[in-house]
Image: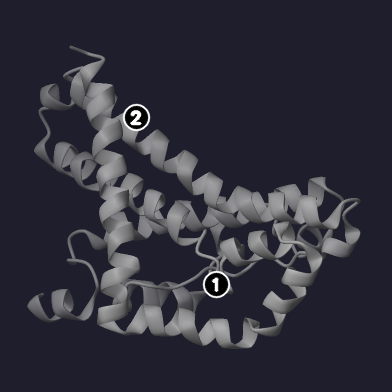
Amino acid sequence: MDFLDRFFRYPIDQLPFFLLTILIAFTVHEFSHAYFANKFGDPTAKLLGRVTLNPVVHFDLFGVLLLIIAGFGWARPVPVNRANFDKPRLMGAIVSVVGPLSNLLLAIIGAIVYGCLFGSGVLGNIENERVVTALMTFLPMFSITNFFLFMFNLIPLPPLDGYRILEDVLPRPLSRKLQGVEQWSIFIFLLILVIPPLQAVTIQPLYIFANNMYMDLVGLIIELYR
C-alpha cells in the first residue's frame, strides 16, 4: 500500500474521489464546448458523438493515467470548426470560454453543498462515519479541483482554452503573430508543467488561490446559517 501511495499523485484512499472529480469535471467541460459549438452552427462535435455527458467519449486514457501519476493530464479535445459560425471570432471565443466557466460552476456548486451541509448541522448529525469521511473528502476536493481547472484552462498557452480565447479576441494582426509563435508556446507550457521552480511560480499559486476561493465561499455559506 505504501508503494502505491508513492506511485500515485494522491493517497490511495483518496484516489476514488479524485477519479470521480475528474470524471465529472472533464466530462462537463468538454460537453460544454461541444454543446455550444453545435448550437452556434458547427456540427463537427455532434457528428463525432461529443454532445453528450457520457464520460467515455471525452476521456483520453493516457491523459487520465498521467493525471493520476504525475498530477497533470487532459481529456480528448472537442474539435471545433469556426468556419461554420456566423461570427467565427465571437462565437469561437464563447465556445472556448464555456469550458472553464463550467468548471467554475461545478466548483461553486460543490462549495455551496458543503457549506450548507456543515452550516445546517446535517453533516454533524450523520451517524455513519464513512459517509461523513467521504463527504468531507470528496466535496472539498471536487470544488478546489474545479476552481483550479477554471483558472488553469484560462492560461493563454496552447492547447489551453485561454490561448484560443486570446486568439479570437485580439485584433487580427496580433492574432496572426500569435499563431506564428504557437509552435514554441507548447514547449513553454510543457516546461511549466515539468520543472519544479517554474511550477512554484505558476501552477502552485493557482492551487493556493483555488483553495482560498473554496474556503472563502464555504465560509460565506456557513455564516448565512449563524
**Residue 40: image location, x then y, percent:** 83, 48
Q: Say what secondary structure mark 2 lies in.
A: helix
- The answer to whether 223 is drawn above or below residue 179 in the figure is above
- The answer to whether 124 is drawn above or below residue 28 in the figure is above
Q: Amino acid at mark 1?
A: Leu
Q: Amino acid at mark 2?
A: Ile
Report how far apart the C-alphas of labels 2 and 1 lie in the structure.
Answer: 31 Å
**Mark 1: few/some/many CA within 10 Å (<14, 14-19, 20+):** many
Q: Which residue is mark 1?
A: 157
Q: Say what secondary structure mark 1 lies in.
A: loop
Residue for point 62% across, 68% down:
77
Q: Which residue is mark 2?
A: 112
Query: What label does residue 17 carry, if any?
Result: none
Q: Quadrant of the C terminus?
A: top left
Residue for point 35% across, 54% down:
145
Residue 126 appears in view: yes
Q: Quadrant of residue 149?
A: bottom left
Residue 53 appears in view: no
**Residue 225: image location, x then y, percent:** 22, 13
Judge from the rendering whether residue 165 lies leftward or rightward of residue 153; answer left or right: right
Residue for point 50% across, 87% down:
187
**Residue 223: image location, x then y, percent:** 21, 19
Which of the two residues, 73 or 176, is positioned nearer the viewer here?
176
Q: First in sequence: mark 2 or mark 1?
A: 2
